[in-house]
Image (cartoon, rainbow, N blue to C red):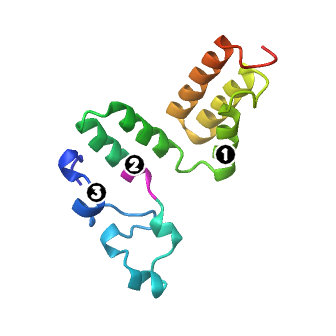
Amino acid sequence: MKKPGIADYPMAETQGKAVCGPRGVALDQITLDAVMDGSIGIDDLRITRAALHAQADIARDAGRAALAQNFERGAELIDVPQDVIMQTYEMLRPGRVQSKQALLDQADMLRRDYGAEQIADFLARAAEIYHRRGLFPKD
């Protein structure tokens, strides 16, 4: 598939054969009949890293750099277990962690264990901002 641009939006309508789920089933193959006969399962409905990167390309082509970056961060989270994502989310709520180091440790773990560089950088920036604003009781 060529690098997507704004003309490819919405991908479900313009790229139905090219956008596939984790098992390789294309969007245009996902029908009610296929779900009912059991040939389509929940894994076929999950978004992939490639689809999120394609959405980022479209957003960037449309001049929406911040949205593109969000799609790219989302792509990094594809293989991160749900409980780790929820733990990280909870840690970002002000007052939930006691120190800057707790967020930095979470960032290091996401970088080391999942290769989530942009997410780790986001957490490190959040830790610095929370520290400057006095949001950590032990800092």
Q: Position of residue 82 (x, y in %)?
A: 64, 52
Residue range of the region highlighted in magenta in the rendering: 47-51
Q: Quote the CA–CA distance across marks 2 and 3.
A: 11 Å
Disc nearest the viewer among 2 and 3:
3
Numbered badge on residue 11: 3
Mark 3, residues whose alpha carbon is within 10 Å: few (<14), some, or many (≥20)? many
Tally of numbered tags? 3
Numbered badge on residue 86: 1
- Secondary-structure class at tag 1: helix
Which kind of residue does numbered mark 1 sit on?
Met
Find disc 2 in the rendering and name its residue.
52
Residue 84 versus residue 137: which sits nearer the camera?
Answer: 137
Q: Position of residue 95 (x, y in %)?
A: 75, 27
Mark 1, residues whose alpha carbon is within 10 Å: few (<14), some, or many (≥20)? few
Residue 92 position (above or below residue 6): above
**Sequence-wise first label, 1 or 2:** 2
Q: Residue at x 73, y 21 (%)?
A: 101
Q: Residue at x 46, y 45 (%)?
A: 75
Residue 137 position (above or below residue 69): above
Residue 118 position (above or below residue 55): above
Which kind of residue does numbered mark 3 sit on?
Met
**Sequence-wise first label, 1 or 3:** 3
Mark 2, residues whose alpha carbon is within 10 Å: few (<14), some, or many (≥20)? many
